[in-house]
Image (tube, rainbow, N blue to C red):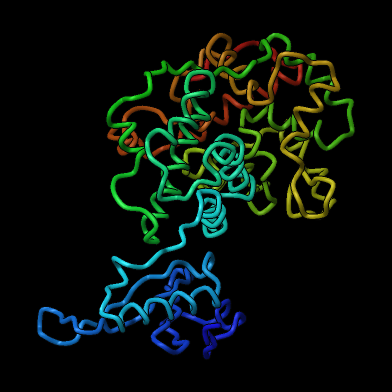
């Protein structure tokens, strides 16, 4: 049995900081600033010279330390040294153990965990591959996956589940790109080739509409909500009045609210548009949230766990319990938009900015410094009065 001991240990491999760490016999663990760990072996090929006439000394990558164990790396390094001693260049003579598609995909998922917007997005990323790629190509060596194998995954869902198929293609491409960067693949990415050659048919995207309640029905619905004590009911009331997205409302923290200025400032990192959004708080909105301050939670709408927000399904489940069928929480944004146009005759830019939609071209937005806060305040106050059942005379929002 080959002698494959050295200076490094499993614990050191997992914890050593940035740099090149020698195990002995030309084997090194390389830790990059990003934290990725990989193996290289440095050998001198007997009888071969570089372009300067010196003995040919070469570094060879043995794979990532997340895939190749310390013992495997030592065995491979020994194999490379033996070949080099015989005058054989390991680049052309080594039998490299190639990981399969699922192994690389799982590692990419782990490596990118800190970059996901939230845990849910990270889980969705790997779930798409688990459902549509792993059953077909998961066990295939990563270097054997070409256009036919990618098409095996994409073709069955390309038309029926087009958005899912597009996300799947993007994720397969990332896995194959990472495999190439680790030295396990060569040549163009087959996902790119399929796209460039337009192998798959064009699919006309269908506009997605969130089922919305008629604005005429909102006051009665809101009155029903007002008689419920559940936190989900309060969050849904606030969502109706603000026209905000579900995630923006549920993630709302007390430090985003200025009661005195009657203002909620949702930070850019929580907005779909990635821009900070100011929401004017009306009497109706404040009446919902001010009593909740007594709970002394980080979040305005606290869920079952202390200092954690309400579940993102809570409001939808409440709608179902209320037997409100065919309506989504997101749909209340459309309800508000219809009311703003048909009843309040609000200018388009005021209504759209109230929903945190981008208005106009990039150039127009560059010149339009104002977010029309005070004009939006008038509109939202009017909406609150209507929803609460005290609409009075309809006024024009200028």
Residue at image position (55%, 46%) is 139
Please say if 20 is above or below 149. below
Q: Residue furthest left?
A: 52
Q: How many numbered marks have been drawn onto this rendered protein structure?
A: 0
Left or right of 34 on screen, residue 129: right
Of the pair 325 and 335, the residue shown nearer to us: 325
Residue at image position (76%, 30%) is 315
Residue at image position (27%, 78%) is 58
Look at the image and tell me whether residue 230 can be seen.
Answer: yes
Look at the image and tell me whether residue 265 can be seen.
Answer: no
Of the pair 100 and 257, the residue shown nearer to us: 100
Residue 175 placement (x, y as % from top left): 45, 49
Of the pair 312 and 66, the residue shown nearer to us: 66
| Quadrant of the drawing holding the N terminus | bottom right
Residue at image position (73%, 15%) is 218
Please say if 217 is above or below 142. above
Residue 39 placement (x, y as % from top left): 44, 74
Please say if 164 is above or below 105. above
Left or right of 274 on screen, residue 252: right
Of the pair 299 and 382, the residue shown nearer to us: 299
Q: What is the quadrant of residue 195 in the picture?
A: top left
Left or right of 3 on screen, residue 312: right
Residue 129 placement (x, y as % from top left): 56, 40
Left or right of 294 on screen, residue 189: left
Please say if 4 is above or below 235. below
């Amino acid at each position: 049995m080959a002698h494959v001991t050295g200076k490094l240990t499993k614990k050191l491999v997992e914890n050593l900081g940035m740099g090149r760490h020698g195990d002995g016999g030309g084997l090194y663990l390389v830790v990059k600033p990003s934290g990725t760990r990989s193996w290289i072996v440095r050998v001198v090929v007997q009888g071969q010279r570089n372009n300067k006439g010196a003995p040919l000394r070469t570094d060879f990558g043995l794979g990532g330390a997340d895939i190749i164990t310390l013992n495997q790396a030592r065995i491979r390094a020994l194999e490379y040294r033996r070949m080099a001693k015989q005058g054989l260049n390991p680049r052309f003579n080594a039998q490299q153990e190639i990981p399969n598609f699922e192994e690389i995909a799982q590692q990419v998922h782990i490596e990118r965990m800190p970059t996901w917007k939230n845990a849910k997005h990270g889980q969705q990323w790997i779930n798409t591959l688990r459902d549509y790629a792993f059953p077909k190509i998961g066990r295939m060596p990563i270097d054997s996956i070409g256009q036919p194998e990618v098409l095996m995954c994409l073709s069955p869902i390309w038309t029926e589940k087009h958005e899912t198929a597009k996300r799947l293609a993007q994720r397969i491409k990332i896995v194959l790109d990472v495999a190439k960067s680790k030295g396990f693949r060569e040549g163009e990415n087959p996902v790119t080739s399929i796209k460039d050659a337009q192998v798959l048919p064009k699919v006309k995207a269908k506009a997605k509409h969130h089922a919305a309640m008629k604005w005429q029905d909102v006051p009665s619905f809101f009155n029903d909500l007002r008689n419920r004590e559940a936190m989900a009911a309060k969050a849904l009331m606030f969502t109706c009045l603000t026209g905000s997205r579900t995630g923006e409302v549920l993630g709302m923290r007390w430090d985003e609210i200025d009661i005195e200025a009657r203002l909620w400032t949702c930070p850019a990192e929580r907005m779909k548009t990635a821009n900070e959004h100011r929401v004017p708080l009306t009497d109706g909105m404040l009446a919902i949230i001010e009593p909740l301050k007594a709970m002394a939670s980080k979040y305005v709408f606290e869920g079952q766990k202390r200092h954690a927000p309400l579940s993102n399904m809570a409001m939808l489940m409440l709608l179902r319990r209320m037997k409100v069928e065919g309506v989504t929480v997101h749909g209340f944004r459309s309800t508000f938009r219809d009311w703003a146009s048909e009843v309040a005759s609000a200018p388009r830019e005021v209504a759209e900015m109230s929903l945190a939609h981008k208005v106009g071209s990039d150039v127009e937005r560059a010149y339009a410094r104002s977010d029309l806060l005070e004009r939006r305040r008038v509109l939202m106050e009017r909406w609150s009065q209507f929803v609460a059942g005290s609409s009075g005379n309809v006024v024009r929002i200028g």
